[in-house]
């Protein structure tokens, strides 16, 4: 893989040329940034920026004013190659808090190991309705220990309002959901995004996560996507590397909580 070329393509397709990630969301391009304004319970944030040292602080302040005016918490999704080089420090100074760093990993579908099946006793079930979305959200809360309210709302909107561009699945064992994940298929791009792969603790290390990655990659291949990408945590990186994913850069979510700042 030509890492520089694929990263440049990713920036053009998925960041500078971003599309809304679901019903009710919109993309705006203003002041050297591309931002998504999500629905009331959806994700809002900066997905791409073209800034230098002279313009960075002003652009950050403008985005804070904009989203504060909407009463929306938002995220600045910073990649390791974004400029200026001290953009992360400038975001922290402006009141953002950095979430754990992730790794952008990409694979060409044709190069992936896809003949991976779930372990014995586990079946992969497609998510097509509210009941399935609830299972995905419940698994994520158990797997990650976080509130899944926003993800639940966004996935339900995608499954019911834009089903052609999302694939969500639950792995079930003995009638109980043990792992769940989704894939977002962005029309007009060459990338399918793998998101939210989480497995309950008692089922980790048995190959369920690998099976869900392979299942979604097969769907991406069938629908004509050339690449699949993951924002991987450290726990997932070795599994993805064994499947054929390669590291392109890092990505760090910088989060700005409007209500928290107002209270301060």
Image: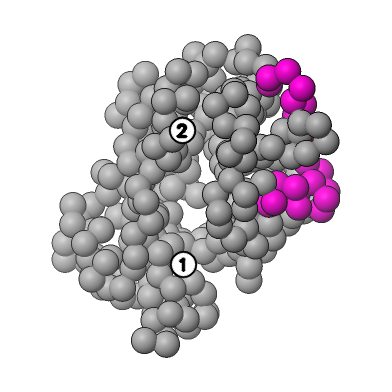
**In x, y percent, where is residue 18?**
50, 49
Rendered position, 159 above or below 91: above
Please, what secondary structure does the residue beneath circle 2 have?
loop
Rendered position, 142 above or below 167: below
Is 59 or 237 nearer to us in this picture? 237
Q: Which numbered disc covers residue 74?
A: 1
The residue tagged 2 is 236
Quadrant in the rendering for residue 115:
top right
Between discs 1 and 2, the one toward the N terminus: 1
Q: Residue furthest bottom?
A: 263
The answer to the question of whether label 1 and label 2 lie on touching residues, with beta carbons closer than 8 A, is: no
Residue at position x 58%, y 39% from top?
201
Q: What is the quadrant of the N terminus in the image?
A: top left
What is the image's colouring? one colour
From this viewpoint, is residue 89 visible? yes
**In x, y percent, where is residue 174?**
81, 31
Please tell me whether residue 196 belongs to the stretch shown in magenta. no
Is 245 or 220 nearer to us in this picture? 245
Dot 1: few (<14), some (14–19), or many (≥20) neighbours within 10 Å?
many
Q: Residue furthest front?
A: 202
Rendered position, 250 above or below 243: below
Quadrant in the rendering for residue 170:
top right
What segment is highlighted magenta in the picture?
Answer: 118-138
Is 140 placed left or right of 86 in the picture? Answer: right
Residue at position x 38%, y 75% from top?
64
- Mark 1 and mark 2: span between their CA atoms? 25 Å
Please tell me whether residue 131 belongs to the stretch shown in magenta. yes
**In x, y percent, where is residue 102?**
38, 43
**In x, y percent, where is residue 135?**
75, 47
């Amino acid at each position: 893989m030509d890492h520089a070329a694929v990263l440049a393509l990713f920036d053009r397709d998925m960041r500078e040329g971003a599309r809304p990630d679901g019903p009710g969301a919109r993309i705006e391009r203003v002041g050297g940034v591309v931002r998504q304004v999500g629905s009331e319970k959806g994700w809002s944030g900066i997905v791409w920026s073209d800034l230098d040292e002279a313009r960075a602080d002003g652009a950050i302040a403008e985005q804070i004013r904009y989203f504060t005016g909407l009463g929306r918490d938002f995220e600045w999704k910073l990649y390791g190659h974004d400029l200026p080089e001290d953009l992360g420090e400038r975001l922290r100074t402006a009141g953002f808090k950095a979430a754990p760093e992730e790794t952008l990993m990409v694979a060409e579908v044709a190069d992936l190991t896809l003949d991976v099946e779930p372990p014995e006793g586990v079946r992969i079930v497609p998510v097509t309705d509210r009941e399935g979305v609830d299972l995905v959200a419940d698994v994520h809360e158990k797997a990650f220990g976080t509130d899944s309210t926003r993800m639940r709302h966004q996935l339900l909107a995608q499954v019911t309002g834009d089903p052609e561009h999302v694939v969500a699945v639950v792995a079930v064992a003995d009638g109980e959901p043990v792992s769940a994940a989704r894939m977002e298929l962005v029309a007009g791009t060459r990338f399918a995004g793998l998101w939210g792969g989480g497995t309950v603790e008692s089922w980790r290390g048995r190959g369920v996560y690998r099976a869900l990655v392979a299942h979604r990659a097969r769907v991406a291949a069938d629908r004509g996507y050339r690449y699949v990408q993951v924002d991987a945590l450290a726990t997932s990186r070795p599994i993805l590397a064994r499947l054929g994913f390669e590291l392109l850069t890092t990505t760090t979510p910088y989060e700005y909580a409007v209500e928290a700042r107002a209270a301060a």
